[in-house]
Image (cartoon, rainbow, N blue to C red):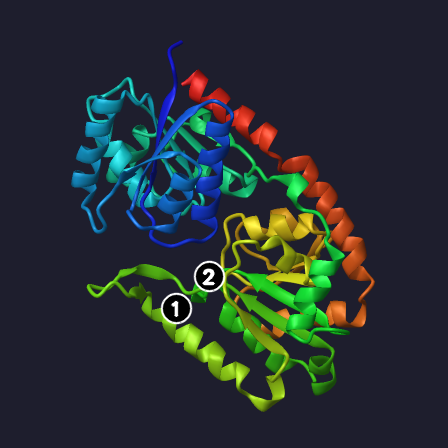
Amino acid sequence: MGEIKVLHCLNAPSWGGLEIYSVELMIELQRNGLKQAALCIPGSRAADELKRASVEVFELPAGISKFAHARLIRRFIKEKGFTHLHSHTRLDMWACALAKWNKGGIKHIYNLYMNALPKQDFVHKWLFSKVDALCTSSQNILDDAKKNFPIAPKKLHLIRYGRKTDQYVHAPEKREHIRSKYNAEGKIVFGTLCRIDPGKGVRELVSALDHLTDEEIGKIQLWIVGDLTIVGKNPDGSIHYEGPSKELSDWIDRKIAEPRLKGHLVRIPFQKEYIPYIDALDVFALASYNETYSLSILDAMLMEKPVIGTNAGGTPEQIGHNERGTLVEAKNAKALAEGMRIYIQNPSLTETQGKIGRTWVLSQHNWPTTLQKTVEIYQKL
């Protein structure tokens, strides 16, 4: 067969798990000899990271319509000779499907990072007919896609997220330095790494502190590590944040100022070098309402941290039957507090569950296997 040339479409101004993983996938594929390029919003973090890694980036104007987006993709196919389109968001999937119109030789791979809600109408039947392979890291989501999407089962593929497992190494000195910076010595530190977004359950996680006793609060800290959801830029060049995200951020700041939580609720900006911050935690928490399949949970497990997660989406698949952490009810601050209480009362459980979690991730999530399966799909198509 001829040379495979892949154009990835990533229409996303924010920088969260979806964007981080999509960028990592492109970079790793290119490092392994497969020609990659990306169509991104100029000035986005994704575009900047890809350029630094020498991945060719084309500009996608912000707010572009699906049809204009598709015309742009068709132009690049003609000019650059791309053989495959790889979409990473719902908007990109639509644009790639439209771009495939009367171009049967172009293959379209769609990475599904969201839940597979029922889509059986005529429009989605046409849309999924233009998807040649749908890939997801979650078996639960794959099963839902088989049931809820009008797509042939042979097009569905389970490809676990790849992680650079050799990077997840304990650094005791860094851990103690970070903990000392936030006066966490002698405390059990719970923490989350996520966007400041209502759907991530950040409000419920912070509210869980209200359900702990003063004695319990005195033994812990809760770290909220992450930034607000970015919508774009204002005409003056300043960042435009999503309304609910900004409202939640302001609420967290007010909670931090409460006398009872002073020194026990800590806010930390997103950290590019985030592994040391995970290492500085004792227990990781992700309170998302319906997380598809969390990268941050995998990262926490690789650092031998047990996970408090919600019993929704792909999180139960990751935590298992409470052997790698603790599952609690979603949208329930009191349930999250009970999850915290388990580790406050049984601190030795953090080490036991942490080791089990790392073993599981090493067996399921590594780049060599992920890349091999991805390239095989390109080749078979």
Q: Which residue is mark 2?
A: 195
Where residue 73 appears, as percent x and y from the top left, is 23, 32
**128 on left or right of 52:** left
Residue lying farthest to the top in this orientation: 1
Q: Is residue 306 above or below residue 345?
A: above
Where residue 264 appears, as percent x and y from the top left, is 64, 79
Are there few (<14), some (14-19), or many (20+) residues within 10 Å of tag 1? some
Residue lying farthest to the bottom in this orientation: 259
What residue lies at 19% left-to-right and 47% top-to-bottom?
A: 64
Identify residue type, mark 1. Ser
Where disc 1 sits, the SS reads helix
Q: How many marks?
A: 2
In the rendered image, which quarter is residue 222 located in? bottom right
Q: Are marks 1 and 2 in contact (CB under 8 Å)?
A: yes
Identify residue type, mark 2. Arg
Where disc 2 sits, the SS reads loop
Q: Is residue 176 above or below residue 125?
A: below
What residue lies at 69% left-to-right and 81% top-to-bottom?
A: 217
Report whether residue 254 is seen: yes
Residue lying farthest to the right in this orientation: 348
Which sits in the foreground, 94 or 350? 350
Q: Is residue 349 above or below residue 42?
A: below
* Quadrant (top left/top right/bottom left/bottom right) for the C terminus: top left
The image's mark for residue 245 is: 1
Q: Earlier in the sequence, mark 1 or mark 2?
A: 2
Where residue 225 appears, as percent x and y from the top left, is 54, 65
Which sits in the foreground, 303 or 116? 303
Q: Is residue 136 above or below residue 19?
A: above
